[in-house]
Image (cartoon, rainbow, N blue to C red):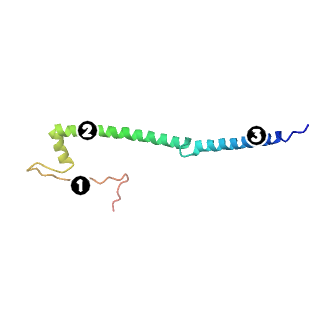
Amino acid sequence: MRKTNSQQPKSFWSRYARTILGFALLLLAIHDIFGSHGLLAMRRTQSQIRELHGEIDRLNQENRELGKQVQSLRSDPKAVERIAREEMGLARPGEMIFKLPDEPQKSSSPAKKP
């Protein structure tokens, strides 16, 4: 038995529609994975967020330590004097500061004598 003309176009359009739908789904999947807001971009963003959280934690710790140093400098005059002497090279009136050169590092092999 032969198919009638009314069934052939339906079959053709049905195949055509399925092909277009499959192609559209393929494009959608590619876009969802590789697109600017896709799966790979989301993973990169999550990685950047983790790195930034780590940096925030490190900076918060550094901020707490600096806050402790500020509090120490405000309440302890000896701490201020120590920093003035060690880092700025200041001295009290009448004191003399002697700066000795650093010792050169000794090599592991003995030096040759002539």
- The residue closer to the viewer here, 18 or 96, is 18
Q: Which residue, given by chain and number where applicable, does mark 1 sit on? A: 101
Helix, strand or loop status at disc 1: loop
Q: Nearer the viewer, mark 3 or mark 2?
A: 3
For label 2, the crowd category at 10 Å Cα-Cα, with few meaning under 14, some 14 to 19 and many 20 or more, is few
The residue that appears at 46% across and 42% down in the rendered structure is 48
Q: Residues within 10 Å of mark 1 (few under 14, many from 20)?
A: few
Query: Does dot 2 land on a helix, a strand or a loop?
Result: helix
Compare marks 1 and 3 and give the one earlier in the sequence: 3
Tell me the kind of residue under disc 1.
Answer: Pro
Query: Residue 36 got which mark?
Result: none
Q: Residue furthest right?
A: 1
- Identified at 45% across, 40% down, the residue is 49
Q: Where residue 72 appears, x then y in whole percent?
A: 20, 38
Residue farthest along the bottom direction in this orientation: 114
Q: Left or right: 30 with respect to 98?
A: right
Judging depth in this view, the residue of 41 and 102 nearest the camera is 41
Q: Is residue 112 above or below residue 52?
A: below
State left or right for residue 61 relative to residue 53: left
Q: Measured from the top left, where is residue 94 in percent x and y?
A: 8, 50
Q: Which residue is mark 3?
A: 14
Disc 3 to disc 2: CB gap under 8 Å: no
Instruction: Nearest to the eye among marks 1 and 3: give it.
Output: 3
Residue type marked 2: Gly
Instruction: Give percent across and percent down for residue 80.
Output: 17, 43
Residue assigned mark 2: 67
Q: Secondary structure at mark 3?
A: helix
Quarter of the image where the N terminus is located: top right
Disc 3 marks a residue whose amino acid type is Ser
Disc 2 to disc 1, how far (Cα)? 34 Å
**Left or right side of 31 for 102:** left
Q: Residue at x 43, y 41 (%)?
A: 51
